[in-house]
Image: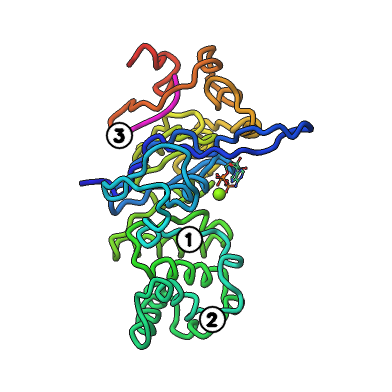
Amino acid sequence: MTPILQLDDVRKHYSVRSGLSRRAVSVRAVDGVSLQLERGETLGLVGESGCGKSTLARTLVLLEKPDSGEIRFDGRPVAFTDRAALRRDAQIVFQDPYTSLPPHMKVRRIIAEPLLIHRMAAGAELRDRVEALIADVGLPASVADKLPGQLSGGQRQRVSIARALALEPSLLIADESVSALDVSVQAQILNLLNSLRERHGLTLLFVSHDIGVVTYVSQRIAVMYLGKIVELGPTADVYGRPLHPYTRALMAAVPSVERRGRERIEVRGDPPDPKHPPPGCAFHPRCPIAQDICRVEAPAVREWLPGRHAACHFALGPETDGRNNG
Ligand SMILES: Nc1ncnc2c1ncn2[C@@H]1O[C@H](COP(=O)(O)OP(=O)(O)OP(=O)(O)O)[C@@H](O)[C@H]1O
Ligand SMILES: [Mg+2]
């Protein structure tokens, strides 16, 4: 089956001023990302703050114009200049339900707005659709006449999701959309997203810095470091045997019953300055298994095991240098 979304070598760099000289330098927020989303799956995108997750999410729905690369939606190449191309098919739900909902608008109107803008419903039909959407995200009908400020964080997030679903997108992107919520409410929203995916045949791209949350909802995960995907594979496989030392480091920060007592690797130090990335593999200054080659040669993404991709010279261990096993 054709993937719903295919990215090929997509780049988005920002020019920013740096240092006392205010010299213009480039931040490689998204630096050559290739990725496929299969119809109906949840792909989790994880990595530390600043690694480029939101830029990638915004770029792939053309909220940001990519610098280069190719994006195909449903097999068709998307013109980067055609912002409207994906406006209905792909929707983003953002993190903060406080700031992302207009405070003076009733819930009924907030959810109706995309339908009005796209002239998809009016009158009684509009009212019915809004009420169905409210029920669909598990909210009581009474929220329709409330303002966002009268709702809890979890309820507001459900309103954001209902608004995103109004245009019947085939792809929903949730960018840190549970990070601001209490743990028990997070679980409810994650379960809601999963049931919406099943009921509506949605494809979900789930973005979070928390690999624990990501593994809970995703069939596959993509791990991002400094603008690049460094590991990609089925969640159970990545969890059982992570190929990239950065994935291992992220996982070590999440306590779990099964992994108690196993070796723990901490991510040493802070992420590198994206304005001045290290030479070679960008992870090498923090990597517990770095060798000489890692300081000079950036590892390409390779399929080391069926369906398992990683950008590490030593993905299968120190004895298997990537150059000798191609
Ligand atoms: N509009 C912009 N102009 C300049 N630099 C930007 C812009 N947007 C993002 N960046 C930079 O691009 C890099 C990636 O940022 P991005 O917000 O995509 O990361 P993120 O992984 O979503 O982080 P977080 O987990 O904090 O949300 C960062 O270095 C950020 O400072
Ligand atoms: Mg972000």
Secondary structure state at the residue bearing disc 1: strand
Determine whether 193 is above or below 29 in the image.
Answer: below
Residue type at mark 3: give it: Gly
Disc 1 crowd, CA 10 A, few/some/many (<14, 14-19, 20+): many
Which residue is painted at 49% across and 75% down in the image?
A: 110
Residue drawn at x 51%, y 79% is 107
Could you say whether the residue bearing mark 2 is in a helix, strand or loop? loop
Q: Label 2 amino acid?
A: Lys
Q: Nearer the viewer, mark 3 or mark 2?
A: 2
Task: Give the residue type that dot 1 points to.
Answer: Val
Q: Position of residue 162 (x, y in %)?
A: 43, 70
Mark earlier in primary sequence (3, 2): 2
Q: Is mark 3 within 8 Å of ligand 1?
A: no
Foreground residue among 264 and 1: 1
Query: Which residue in the rendered view is the most extreme toward the front?
Result: 81
Q: Which residue is mark 2?
A: 106
Residue 224 lies in magenta, yes or no? no
Query: What segment carries the magenta color?
Result: 308-313
Give me the residue at 34% from left, 15% from top: 325
Visible in this render: residue 215? Answer: no
Residue at (48, 46) in percent of width and height: 65
Horizontal side of 60 relative to 291 (left or right) equals left
Residue linked to disc 3: 307
Front one among 152 and 20 = 20
The residue beneath circle 1 is: 93
**Disc on the earlier residue, 1 or 3:** 1
